Image: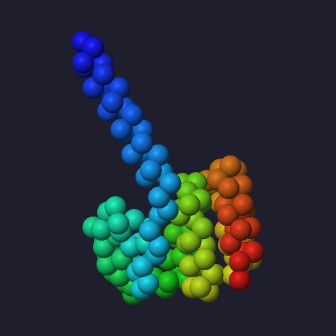
Amino acid sequence: MRSIAKTLAGAAVALSAATSASAQTPPPAPVRGATPAQQQFGEISPKFAELTDNVLFGDVWERPGLSKRDRSLITVSALIAMNRPDQLRPHMVRARENGVTQDELIETITHLAFYAGWPSAVTAISVAKDVFKKP
């Protein structure tokens, strides 16, 4: 029993040292020319990054049935309704690039407060405030 306990204790020390070393290692620098998906999760999930780039943004966002402006409003609305601030932030930036005005985004949030819930709207207002600060 003592040898098992000793082995487990040694393994715990080794694991702790490895965890501490990896926690101090800075994340890899973004690869020049890499897409946002490749930068965000390409290293851990290259297939997910590929699907994001080729299917979501390469196909779905390029379909002719809706303008990119409309797709942005729809996407922002869905992310507000689901209270997904991490994804909302870049999509608000994209919405602005696709012609959605600051006033329209604020009006969208105000409208959705009554359909998606006040807390989701409060979160979205906070995200919008950050997005609007950046040029």
Residue at point 57%, 65% (across, down): 88
> How are the colours assigned in the image?
rainbow
Tell me the quadrant of the picture where the C terminus can be found: bottom right
Let me know if residue 128 appears in the view: yes
Residue at point 30%, 68% (across, down): 46
Asked which quadrant contains residue 56, the reply is: bottom left
| Residue sitting farthest toward the top | 1
Residue 129 placement (x, y as % from top left): 74, 67
Asked which quadrant contains residue 32, the reply is: bottom left
Quick one: 122 or 47, which is closer to the camera? Answer: 47
Q: Left of 84 or right of it: where is 66?
A: left
Residue 80 placement (x, y as % from top left): 59, 60
Q: Is 103 situated above or below 82?
A: below
Q: Is 56 situated above or below 13?
A: below
Q: How many marks?
A: 0
Quick one: 90 or 63, which is closer to the camera? Answer: 90
Residue at point 44%, 50% (across, down): 21
Let me know if residue 81 appears in the view: no
Residue 121 placement (x, y as % from top left): 68, 56
Quick one: 116 or 57, which is closer to the camera? Answer: 57
Tell me the quadrant of the picture where the N terminus can be found: top left
Asked which quadrant contains residue 16, the reply is: top left
Residue at point 39%, 34% (across, down): 13
